[in-house]
Image (cartoon, rainbow, N blue to C red):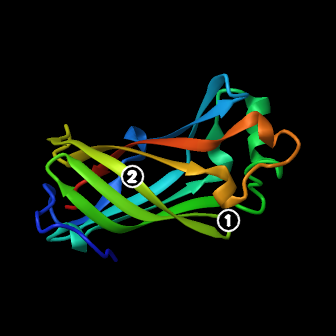
Amino acid sequence: MTTAAPSSALPLAQGTWALDPNHTSVGFTIRHLGVSKVRGRFGDVAAELVVGPTPAESAVQATIALASVDTGNADRDAHVRSPELLDVDRRPTMSFRSTSVRGDGTHWTVDGELTIGQVTRPITLAVELGGVEDFIDGSRHAGFEAHGEVRRKDFGLGFGPLGSMLGDVVKIELDLEFIEPA
């Protein structure tokens, strides 16, 4: 499940935490023509957080439907889904699986593997625990912010005629909320 971590315990109850999709956002930023940025998000996200007694026994996994991309422009979204960029017919999902969790308090590092289509590459996410709070229905929720980046060329994404209009580095911005197990 995981491979390395310090001995400090995570400040969360043990068990499998479910994603609260209504309070979750998976966003990205990429350079356009080297002069501006395009921001977007993915609306179809599934994830779970397994909290063990130590970070070494904890893990997170997520799957994102690439066709759920939304940049605020329908024509651009269709182009991003096309074979020239994401090619969602060949690569319908992107998935993440953690390989280690380390840190303390509110600042954590999660190493893992990101898979897009048939290509898997390592990725490191800087994670901040925003807090754990009781919700109105009595459930407890934990909020996280995570940041990382990937290179399109590492996944063979979008180097057709218009691919050079976009930067290679894609910055990832995650706001995730999980619900404590009953």
Looking at the rendered structure, the kind of residue marked 2 is Leu
Which residue is under mark 2?
125
Q: Earlier in the sequence, mark 1 or mark 2?
A: 1
The correct choice, above or below, for 6 with respect to 73 in the image is below
Query: Who is closer to the viewer here, 121 or 42?
Result: 121
Residue drawn 52% across the image and 41% down it: 171
**Front tag of 1 and 2:** 2
Query: Who is closer to the viewer here, 11 or 158?
Result: 158
Relative image position of residue 168 (x, y in whole percent): 66, 44
Question: What's the CA distance linking mark 1 and mark 2?
Answer: 20 Å
Query: Who is closer to the viewer here, 79 or 153?
Result: 153
Label 1–label 2 contact, CB within 8 A: no
Relative image position of residue 48 (x, y in whole percent): 37, 61
Visible in this render: residue 18? yes
Residue drawn 16% across the image and 45% down it: 138
Residue drawn 14% across the image and 49% down it: 105
Mark 1 residue crowding within 10 angstroms, few (<14) / some (14–19) / many (20+): some
Tell me the SS state at disc 1: loop
Quadrant in which the N terminus is drawn = bottom left
Tell me the SS state at disc 2: strand
